[in-house]
Amino acid sequence: MPFYYMDFFKEGKVKFFAEDKQLKKAEVFFNPKRKFDRDLNVLLVSSLMHKNSSGLELFSGSGVRGLRLCIETGKFSVFAFNDIKSKEIVEKNLQANRGKLLKIDKKVTGFDSASFETSKKYDYIDIDPFGSPVFYLNSALKLLKKEGILAVSATDTAALMGSAQKACMRKYGSVSLKTAYSNELSIRILIKKVIEEAAVHSIKLLPLLFNFEGNFLRIYLKSIASNVKERIGYAYQCSKCPSRQIKEEAKCSYCGSKTHRMGKLWLGPLYSKKHVIKMLSALNRGTLDFPEDSILKLSDYLTRLSKELDVFSYYTTSQLSSFLKQPEFSISRFKDKTVLSPKGFRIASSFSDFLNNGLE
Ligand SMILES: C[S@@+](CC[C@H](N)C(=O)[O-])C[C@H]1O[C@@H](n2cnc3c(N)ncnc32)[C@H](O)[C@@H]1O
Ligand SMILES: [Zn+2]
């Protein structure tokens, strides 16, 4: 595609050619709405990775994400960009930023990521495809170094959030369900899938961070040497009331109705508090030269996240009020909120105890 059809953009410290079309058919994909996600990505790499790391981006699109990681974090001495469709434009965009990339050994390829192979292993691997990432986990995990970080995006939220059940079973081997907290289920199913796939490669992964934005989901996991407690299993949602539990029981502990079994799911923490706090302190130290509005958004997100209760799933004010047939409760009434929904809150007790204790 001739370059004069392209627009010229700037994001972070990178300038690049792309098309402002968030469609599959765009020749060079670029979605400006994912800026926050890329800011978060830059902060994560910059605060959690070592200098002289090697990185591999399997789905570069315009290359904006990989370029931002290279230029803004200063953590990479080797970086490989790959995209089946946009090799030429990535090369062009590397040229456009060449002054800032002098110290990095760069490579651009145009392979199908499902069968991507190199003799090198990488400290950071990024999977950011259209739809489901499951077809690419094998090639990425084969190339992930010990202590390396794997970033995985998914946009097949219909499957992950319970609208396309068969697709979820086929791709993730799990049952999802349409619930008030299905975005959390989508994160738990994706983490489970990546952890299971990693186990095939004898890799243990620790979930570091997630970001859910509408139909887009991204998780980060770190390969670790120590044993992570394998917390994979099922959860049970009551068919009649909001109550749910992770303990296997055929009947709802609140109303005694039949339950729906969901899973298998990751039942452990959705993120690593230690790593999120590290990211927050790097942000507060001003290690990144981000504009004020980006800093505020990142700080707000990570602060709220760091305070979340580590329990399975959240309730929403609308679900609770409609169940109790009362006017909608204000979210300010609840102490343990979640970043996953403006109306969402978590409770430490069972649903029955929560109601019996007067909605505390
Ligand atoms: C969602 S975009 C990547 C966006 C980019 N990472 C960013 O942050 O702007 C997905 C990209 O994957 C590429 N792609 C699709 N199927 C592929 C495959 N099998 N192997 C490699 N690249 C592929 C597309 O050409 C497209 O550029
Ligand atoms: Zn019930």
Image (cartoon, rainbow, N blue to C red):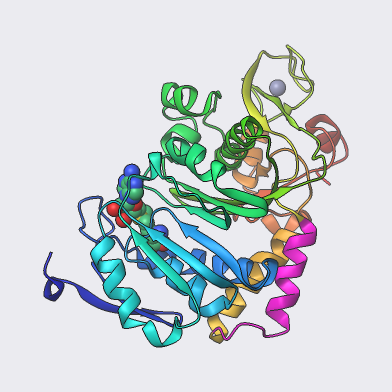
User: In terms of depth relative to the viewer, which is nearer, 119 or 285?
Assistant: 119
State which region is magenta: 273-290
Q: Quadrant of residue 272?
A: bottom right
The answer to whether residue 209 of the structure is visible from this angle is no
Residue 291: give x, y in percent of width and height. Answer: 53, 85
Residue 356 placement (x, y as % from top left): 86, 34
Between 31 and 354, which is closer to the camera in this rendering?
31
70 part of magenta stretch: no
Q: Is residue 339 above or below residue 191?
A: below
Q: Position of residue 25 (x, y in %)?
A: 20, 51
Place of residue 205 in the rendered image (x, y in percent of width and height, measured from the top left): 69, 44
Judged by its main secondary structure, the magenta piece is helix
At 62% from the left and 48% from the top, the residue drawn is: 328
Q: Residue at x 71, y 25 (%)?
A: 233
Location of the N terminus by quadrant is bottom left
Residue at x-position 64% and y-position 41% = 321
In the visual, does 50 lie left or right of 358?
Answer: left
Image position of 308 with respect to 72: above or below: above
